[in-house]
Image (cartoon, rainbow, N blue to C red):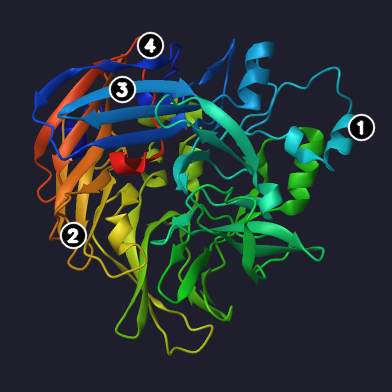
Amino acid sequence: MSECEKLHPEYDMQPWLRSCEVEVKKPITGEIKGTIPKWLQGTFIRNGPGSIKCGDEEFVHVFDGPALLHRFALKNGQATYQCRFLSTDTLKKNRKAQRIVVSEFGTRSVPDPCHTIFDRLASVFSPYNSITDNAGVSVCPFGDEVYAMTEVTNVYKIDPETLESLEKENLFHALIVCHTAHPHVMPNGDIYNVGINIVRGMMKHVIVKFPYSEKGNMFKMAEVVHTIDPRWRLNPSYMHSFGVTENYFVIIEQPLSISLVTILRNHVLNHPFSTSLNWYPDYENQIVLVNRSTGEVIRYRTETFFFMHVINTFEKDGNLIIDVVSYKDAKIIDAMYVEAIKDLHNNPDYGQWSQSRPKRITIPLDAPPDTRVEIKLIAEVGLEAPRIYYDVHNGRPYKYFYGIGSEVHSKYAGSIIKVEANTGEVKTWHEYDGCPSEPMFVPHPDAKEEDDGVLLSAVLWGKDDHAITLLVLNAKDLKEIARTTFKTPSPAPNGFHGWYWPDKYI
């Protein structure tokens, strides 16, 4: 038995395969250990797949389950919990039919016998009524409103107190065909995102600005501020996130491409989106810097890697720095298929599929275009879902990032991890049988240092699927401050991303 197996003999990914059967609409209290800081008063909302089942059928990929929102409210040293499904049109259709009737990222729906191939051909010209609107990846503030998002064109406004689903916005009207799940919120409240759109008959990457508004609809005020030619015109690069610095937008074009021809074919033939993705290992990554003022585009090259999440980007001493969670290829997507998760302990390759490393790309801003730039390891640790002190250090020099240990065969599996970005120093929190979520950094109101605050994480448990724990850690040393464990009426599934709002903003 290896050292890793001795350390974590029971660690697996079963919390991803759970199905919530009973929503928690009214806040419930839990058992508190320790003392939740009185200054920690706000709302922590998370998003992710809520069920692996639909009737007697099962989704085939973790990305496909219907969005389930989790809410932790912290006030006066107490915490409460709620969860509620996002009331999407897709969820309503599936529940009515008691089967999967809308194709998802990896799951092909059962064809409706009443719809002919000609119906599907006609829907190509109005796809937004027929594609999934399951916004189950992230949550983001747009002005004083809260939205659930994914990478499709629909986002849902939600009530941050009740988790009720409110109106749906179609980002097609905001000039985006598809977009990243991680828009950037600027200090003045403006929001930027990167998407793909048709510009004068050609596919382009577009950078879209949503101007801040306290009361107006930010989506209706959206404008394309920059347009960039993709490396491959009919096969734009897939990207889940991007970076922004003081002077540049930072786009990483990786060799995982989206075949637009295949997307159209899939729509007609009712195939899932995943079949339109192609990995080309013989091509390098391209780093695309877009000058925020002039729109000038400069491209650089790096070694081939796959990524989902940019950690941070910033300019310092004449260089532009990109910190990113990298994989050697796109096999992590295969690792999230339901059958792969069920069989992971019998698959000797699974550990390699989930192996990630934080790396730093350094671009001298005086380097000529097409220069192959340096990429170095930050720390010998596998992690995902990175977070930073976002409000102050996004796009600026920083020292610390946090994440979860996502490599199932690593000694860091099931850990919360803190990394000093400049030295590679690693600190961890781990508890046997625990499966923590993405750690959310919340600064102390009088913070004097970058890590002066707490980390919030929702922890699931392998042996108790009817429990979820809100963990509060000291961000400096990852020592536990408090936890509240809630007993849920049905299984508590894992999730992807979240956001924290201090009370004054909700």
- Drawn side of residue 458 relative to residue 183, left or right: left
Q: Earlier in the sequence, mark 1 or mark 4?
A: 1
What is the spatial separation of the Cα atoms under label 1 and label 4, in whole angstroms? Answer: 42 Å
Secondary structure under badge 2? loop
* Crowdedness near tag 1: few (<14), some (14–19) or many (≥20) residues, C-alpha within 10 Å: few
Which residue: 43% across, 28% down? 69
Whole-percent x, y for residue 435 in the image: 27, 31
Q: Earlier in the sequence, mark 1 or mark 2?
A: 1
Q: Amino acid at mark 1?
A: Phe
Secondary structure under badge 4? loop
Q: Which residue is mark 3?
A: 81
What is the spatial separation of the Cα atoms under label 2 and label 4, in whole angstroms? Answer: 38 Å
Circles 3 and 1: CB atoms closer than 8 Å: no
Secondary structure under badge 1? helix
Residue with the most extreme right position: 118
In the rendered view of the protein, which quadrant contains the N terminus? top left
- Drawn side of residue 65 relative to residue 268, left or right: left
Whole-percent x, y for residue 493 in the image: 39, 23
Name the residue nearer the viewer: 123 or 29.
29
Q: Amino acid at mark 4?
A: Ser
Which residue: 39% across, 34% down? 46
Which residue: 48% across, 69% down? 250
Q: Which residue is mark 2?
A: 450
